[in-house]
Image: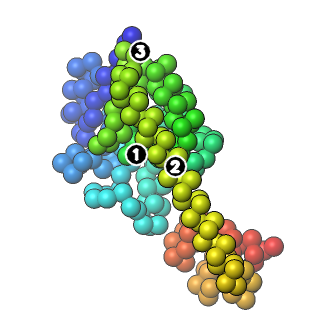
Amino acid sequence: MSNILEVCVDSYASAMAAIAGGADRLELCSALAVGGLTPYTTLLRQIRAESDIPIRCLMRPRAGDFLYTPDELILLRDQILELKAAGAEHIFLEYEHGDSKVKPQQQAMFELSQTGDTIITLEVPRLARSTQQLCEIIEIVRQKHLRLVIVGSITLDCRNGQADPMSEAFLQMAGVFSQLELAMIRSRVRSGMENARAKGRQIGRPQITVDDLPSGFLRHYPAYKSGQLNISELARVCDLSRTTIYKYIDLLEG
């Protein structure tokens, strides 16, 4: 079994030192003093000009929590595009819910992972919401000799091809509780909806018409149609989500 030596760097000097020291891959970031932020594209280009070593970039637009505003998500998207253009190896953005049966980005991440890699997640529901899904992931971790870390909780280390039985058991138990939690949430939601209907209340968002479209959207829509604004820019100036913008456009043009 061959392990992968990945070194986290935030400067050209540290990157060159890591390469000279035998690193197999770099995790590139900036501002390690605050836990790491999105690296500068100029730094990535500078390193790439000297070496073709695989580089994975940390994506974090600011210090602090990970609850990003719509504007910060737009910034993150733009940073990702710039880094990919500058030579970043792989970036994964999973938009599916934890209980989704198909998660293309998660699947791609596991397919790309190599022996000795570490997969880190904040909690079990971020990976899977059913025991079947979790057991499938555990088997992938075992077969590919990976290490799976649930932050502050469980570490399943299969880099030697075997898993600690106790850690695997605890992880499977966490999966059972995650599936139970999902079932309870769904049950409460269904019960609440049935009670609301019984009282004559409307369930879901009210249907809107063209007459209900906000003035801000109508004011900026011509700029979108003329090509002066793209969808993300239109969403930003209207202070709306991209999903809402698409819905309004379909309603207006439908």
- Camera-near label (2 vs 3) is 2
Q: Where is residue 100 shown, x and y percent of the image?
A: 61, 47
Q: Amino acid at mark 2?
A: Leu
Q: Which is more toward the observer, 60 or 160?
A: 160
Q: Where is residue 129 shown, x and y percent of the image?
A: 53, 45
Question: What's the image's color scheme?
Answer: rainbow
Q: Amino acid at mark 1?
A: Glu
Q: Which residue is mark 2?
A: 180
Q: Is residue 205 visible?
A: no
Quadrant of the rendered image containing residue 148: top left
Q: Amino acid at mark 3?
A: Gly
Q: Please tell me which residue is depicted at 51% across the width and 76% down the height of the picture.
A: 239
Using the numbered discs, state the Cα–Cα distance from disc 3 to disc 1 in whole angstroms: 23 Å
Q: Residue furthest top?
A: 1
Q: Earlier in the sequence, mark 2 or mark 1?
A: 1
Q: Which is more toward the observer, 211 or 179?
A: 179
Q: Where is residue 81 shown, x and y percent of the image?
A: 49, 49
Q: Which residue is mark 3?
A: 161
SS of the residue under disc 2: helix
Using the numbered discs, state the Cα–Cα distance from disc 2 to disc 3 in whole angstroms: 30 Å
Q: Against 169, is 225 above or below?
A: below
Q: Is residue 178 visible?
A: yes
Q: Against 51, is 203 above or below?
A: below
Using the numbered discs, state the Cα–Cα distance from disc 2 to disc 1 in whole angstroms: 15 Å
SS of the residue under disc 1: loop
Q: Please tell me which residue is depicted at 40% across the width and 16% down the height of the picture.
A: 162
Quadrant occupied by the C terminus: bottom right
Q: Please tell me which residue is depicted at 40% across the width and 62% down the height of the picture.
A: 68
Quadrant of the rendered image containing residue 221: bottom right
Q: Is residue 53 left or right of residue 132?
A: left
Q: Is residue 166 left or right of residue 81?
A: left
